[in-house]
Each structure stands twice: as structure tokens, then as C-alpha cells.
Amino acid sequence: MSDNYDVIIIGGGPGGYNCAIRCGQLGLKVLCVETHTKLGGTCLNVGCIPSKALLHSTELLETAQKDFASMGLTGEVGFDLKAMMADKDKTVEGLTSGIEFLFKKNNVQRLKGYGRIVDSTTVEVDGKKLKTKNIVIATGSEVATLPNVEIDEKKIVSSTGALELKNVPEKLLVIGGGVIGLELGSVWRRLGSEVTVVEYLDHIMPGMDAEVQKQALRIFKKQKMKFELGRKVTGVEKSGKGLKVKTEASAGGKEKDIDADVVLVCIGRRPFTNDVGLEAAGVETDKRGFILTDHFKTNVPGIYAVGDCTHGPMLAHKAEDEGVAAAEIIAGKAGHVNYDVIPGVVYTAPEIASVGKTEEELKEAGIPYKKGKFAFIANGRARANHKTDGFVKILAHAETDEILGAHMIGAQVGDLIAEVALAMEFKAASEDIARTCHAHPTISEAVRQAAMDVEGWTMQS
Ligand code: FAD
Ligand code: NAI
């Protein structure tokens, strides 16, 4: 391995590996340093992919158990947890080895080891110093922890442990009503756990459109997930074979103990930037450790940062887009990420998806807007599929009709949101969607009907 590179990337997650592939495509001599044997980072190994595999199998299980009879389908369906986990692991294995293939195809060199920056042209990997013209930091994030709640990944677990429990806990207590809590809470509820979510705020999924938050809470409660809103966990104690979770009202007082067999801590993630040589190289971070960037450039010339270790939503596709843009800038092109159009999806059943501004954000910014809404109960395909919960909401500028945001809850909305994201990327008006022919019967018609409703001419409700 020659040690004179155009780019060394530290981290092989979605930010790092996509940056590496794009660098390779652009003819740069690139090395990706990843400490783990498998590439793919949090997303492929312990995040997006394994969680979606379990969400998929358990959603099918619940559909079989609860909805099949109403469609005239007979026979009982059960599950084998070990086999379900093996299926998830197989999916992960296939995808992580796929990145090895993509590296070879695109002339990306890979080094297994822990990278630390020495200076703006030197990275040290397990004692060996490598020279490079540019460095991209893509070290991602790690689980945020709570005082008095020690994660052992067996009884008190982070998302990583919750993806590989050996048995279905009778009582699962989830700390944090955000994305992980709702997704992994759903997985274990469907497998039989009694799930209680303790959330500090008085609502779930902070930052989402308020109407979506309310509808989602109603649906999750109907699914028998329990919620303790406006409450915080102050500690977890062993109690016989189980756990006693000490809580109090977020405002203080009103103490309450809740019994659990397993506790899932998912109160957010923090940047993994502690031991990467940032201080030695003079790379600036904020107080929480996020690397400060301007168009992916840090304050040190030649050092870039992308993904979860920088500001912005902690999402795989955001990391990916930043990795690609950084590679393009290094190659002398005009890399760019449009932060106004980054979709977010929660893969529960129903799914929840959003892009752009929420109503609350538009009101706060004083931007005049019109709103169109369409409920899935009036969509033919949703009815045929027995998936009628939820709605699509489109927000457009009151004067120009430019689409400013879309917020959805319903089956498959994680895919529907791409249509609105594309429209927004082209600065489309709501009328552009309203006048686009959508195939019938598809659930995508709900997007068109919501767009029609912006001007008040919905045809199907
Ligand atoms: P990471 O994926 O964290 O990758 C960083 C890599 O750098 C790691 O492999 C790490 O080992 C390596 N590394 C760190 N330091 C060093 C070093 N010094 N030397 C060598 N290697 C190093 N996002 C979505 O968009 N959709 C989802 O459905 C979704 N689901 C998720 C589910 C869970 C349970 C979790 C935890 C996260 C989920 N996310 C999801 C978030 C997503 O995983 C992250 O946003 C994404 O992985 C960030 O990519 P990254 O490249 O910035 O960092
Ligand atoms: P999150 O930020 O989504 O939710 C954390 C929740 O915990 C918030 O509602 C917060 O108010 C609450 N909280 C914080 N401290 C608390 C306390 N002491 N007691 C009770 N509640 C408390 O973080 P989460 O769910 O851990 O996910 C981490 C990251 O992973 C997110 O940034 C998310 O973007 C990403 N992710 C994305 C997914 C997706 O795109 N589908 C899936 C899973 C994770």
C-alpha cells in the first residue's frame, strides 16, 4: 500500500463509504480507514438495515395475526426469534460485503484500523503514518447515555442490544419517544412485549409536524403501546430478576417507579469525535463535539467532515449526500446539498414521513402558506389493502404556490415522500403535482389529491 493519497477518509459508514466511492469514480487516489471488519457503519451494521429487517418481518407477522382473517386468509402464523435474527444478519452481511465489492469496482483502497489525524496531511492508523492531500472525517455518532442508567446491552440496552435480544421481554421500557423508541418499540410490541415509552416532552417525535405527532400517538396507543409523556427517568435499579425504573415528572416531583424486564435507552446520539486527533490538527467543534463545517470544509484547509459527526439531521441519506458533495468539491467540482429538502421517515406501521417545513415552522417564520390534506380512508387502494390510517398534508406558499413542505402518516408514505422531495428540488408548485397524472389505483393518488386540496378542488373526498 503506497502512502501518498489524494484523500484519506476516516470512517466507513454512509458518509465515508459514499465519499470514497465518489472519489474513486472521479479518479482520486483514495483510502477509507474503518476500524470495524465490516464496512457500512452504524447504518448497515446496527442501524437502518437491521432495524428495517426486523420491522419488516414483525409487520408481516402482525398483519398475518390481525388482518388475514378479515381477508379470508386462514391458518396460524407464529415466529422463531432465532431464525428471524438470522435473516436480519444475512441481510446485513449481504449489504456490508456489497460495499467491499463497490470499493474494488471504484478503485477505493480500504484499511482496517483506527485512524487519528496528526496534521492536515497526515493520518496515523495503528502506529503507521500515511500522507494525503485531503482528509475527510466521517466518524459518525454513538449512543447518548443517561446518568444512573448503565447500558450492559443485555438488560439495559441501546439500539444495538435491542436488535439482538435473545428472548422477547415481557415488559420493555423505552426511554425516549423518538425515532428509535417508536421503531424498536414496535418490533418488540409486535413480538409480544408490553411496551411503555417514557418521554421527557409532552409529545413524541420532537420536530415533526404537530398534526402528525398527534395522529401517530393516537395510533400507537390503539396498538397498545403505553406512553408516559412529560416524564423523565432518574435511574434504573435491579429488582429481583427484573428492573425498577425510577421516574419523575419532567418539571420535577410526582415520582413513579415502573417495572421492566428490559430497558431501551434511546434519547438521541452524540458525535463520535473525541479521539480522532481533532485537537492536534486544530479542527474546531462546538461544545457538544459536532465538527463545525462550511460546505463540508472544517476550519483547517484540506480537512473536511461529513455525516453524523457534523451538524444537521443524523440520517444516512444526509451523510451520503454530504460524502458525495465533499468528494466532488475535493475533485474541483461544485458539490452541494440542499438542506431544505432532506426527507425523514419513521418506519413504524403506519409509516411517518416528512420533508421541508412544518406548519409550526412556517408560522414561526411568518411565511404565508396554504394547506391541502387528504385522508387515506378515501383512497381506493388503501381501502383495498386494509391500510386506511393516516393522511397526506402538503404546504405551499400562499402567493407563489411553491411547495414548502409535506407531512404524511400512512402505509408506504416513506416511499411517497420522494415524489414531493423531487418536486421541491425542482421548485414545483402544488399545482404541478395536482395536474400530474397518477396511476389508479395507487396510494400515490393521495399525494395528488392533497395537492389538489391546496386549491380546494380535491375530487375524491
Ligand atoms: P456512521 O454510520 O456512524 O459510520 C461511522 C464509521 O466510522 C463507523 O463504522 C465507525 O466504526 C468508524 N469510525 C469512527 N471513528 C473511527 C476512527 N477513528 N478510525 C476508523 N474508523 C472510525 N438513518 C436513516 O436515514 N434511516 C434509518 O432508517 C435509520 N435507522 C437507524 C436505526 C438505528 C437503530 C440507528 C442507531 C440509526 C439509524 N439511522 C437511520 C441513522 C444512521 O445510521 C446514521 O445517520 C448514519 O449511519 C450516519 O452515517 P455516518 O457515516 O455519518 O456515520
Ligand atoms: P431522537 O432524537 O429521535 O429521540 C430521542 C427522544 O428522547 C426525544 O423525543 C427526546 O425528547 C427524548 N429524551 C431525551 N432525553 C430524555 C430523558 N432523559 N428522558 C426521557 N426522554 C428523553 O433519538 P433516537 O430515537 O435515540 O435516535 C437517534 C438518531 O438516530 C436520531 O437522530 C435519528 O435521526 C436516527 N435514527 C433515524 C431513523 C430513521 O430515519 N428512521 C431510525 C432510527 C434512528
Image: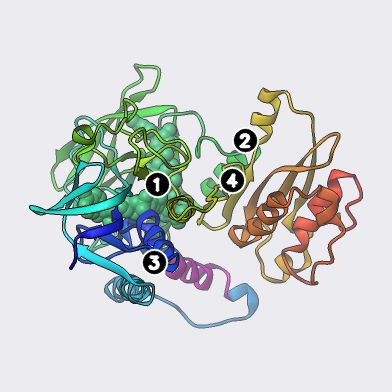
Q: Does residue 171 appear anywhere in the picture? A: no
Residue 21 at x, y percent in the picture? 40, 65
Determine the CA span between mark 1 and mark 2: 30 Å
Determine the CA span between mark 3 and mark 1: 17 Å
What residue appears at the point 55 percent right and 48 percent down from the top-left corner? 336
Where does ligand 2 appear, by image quarter? top left
What residue appears at the point 78 percent right and 67 percent down from the top-left corner? 380
Is the residue indicated by label 1 positioned so its CB lies within 8 Å of ligand 1? Answer: yes
Q: Secondary structure at mark 2?
A: helix
Q: Earlier in the sequence, mark 1 or mark 2?
A: 2
Local crowd size for mark 4, using a 10 Å CA cut-off: few (<14), some (14–19), many (≥20) = few
Residue matched to label 2: 210
- Looking at the image, is mark 3 or mark 2 nearer the viewer? 3
Residue matched to label 1: 306
Residue matched to label 3: 24
Q: Earlier in the sequence, mark 1 or mark 4?
A: 1
- Residue situated in front as seen by the camera: 137 or 193: 137
Residue 140 at x, y percent in the picture? 32, 47
Q: Secondary structure at mark 4?
A: loop
Q: Determine whether, in the image, residue 134 is placed left or right of residue 376.
A: left
- Residue situated in front as seen by the camera: 40 or 252: 40
In the rendered view, would you say 312 is above or below 69? above
Q: Does residue 3 appear anywhere in the picture? A: yes
The region drawn magenta spans 56-68
Residue matched to label 4: 338
Determine the CA span between mark 4 and mark 3: 23 Å
- Residue situated in front as seen by the camera: 400 or 113: 113
Q: Quadrant of the N terminus?
A: bottom left
Q: Earlier in the sequence, mark 3 or mark 1?
A: 3
What residue appears at the point 84 percent right and 44 percent down from the top-left corner? 454
Q: Determine whether, in the image, residue 18 is placed left or right of residue 144.
A: right
